[in-house]
Image (cartoon, helix red, strand yellow):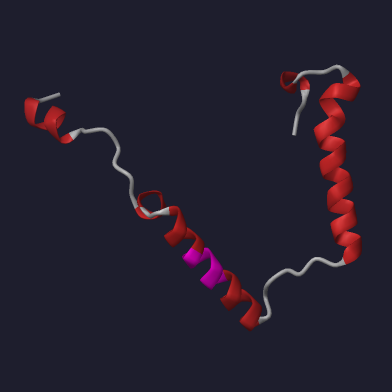
Amino acid sequence: MQESEKQEQSPKSRRGFAAMSAERQREIASQGGRAAHQQGVAHEWNKDEAREAGKKGGQASGFKRKSGRDDQDVLL
């Protein structure tokens, strides 16, 4: 590698969303959510879907404790 190439390679700079403040990221995400709802393509949870998701989350969080397995044994 030449000297000029070494100088050009600096630590990665933050770009895109990583360079934005958390507040600005939330604003953009909020706009996207509103747009999806206006277009009718946003997902809205019903009671049954929420119940099933909660069950899965509870099972996954207790899996390690109940089975005595560590995370290395779990294949997702």
Quadrant position of the C terminus in the picture: top right
Residue ID at (33%, 50%): 15
On the rendered structure, is 40 left or right of 46?
A: left
Magenta region: which residues? 27-32
> Residue reaching furthest left?
3
Q: Where is residue 39 in the image (x, y as percent from the top left)?
A: 63, 82
* Residue at (43% x, 61% y) in the render: 24
Give residue 2's quadrant in the image: top left
Q: Is residue 26 magenta?
A: no
Left or right of residue 65: residue 12: left
User: Which of 62 and 8 lies nearest the eye of the viewer?
Assistant: 62
Q: Where is residue 14 in the image (x, y as percent from the top left)?
A: 33, 45
Q: Residue at x 8, y 26 (%)?
A: 3
User: Which quarter of the figure has residue 46?
Assistant: bottom right
24 to 9, vertically: above or below: below
User: Which residue occupies the extreme front position in the image?
Assistant: 23
Is 62 placed above or below 27 here? above
Q: Is 50 on the left-hand or right-hand side of 16?
A: right
| On screen, residue 55 above or below 69 | below
Find residue 16 and report its horizontal and vertical position in percent.
Answer: 37, 54
Nearer to us in this view, 1 or 70: 70
Total number of numbered discs in the rendering: 0
Residue at 73 percent across and 69 percent down: it is 43
Q: Main secondary structure of the magenta part?
A: helix
* Quarter-of-image position of residue 22: bottom left
Q: Quadrant of the N terminus?
A: top left
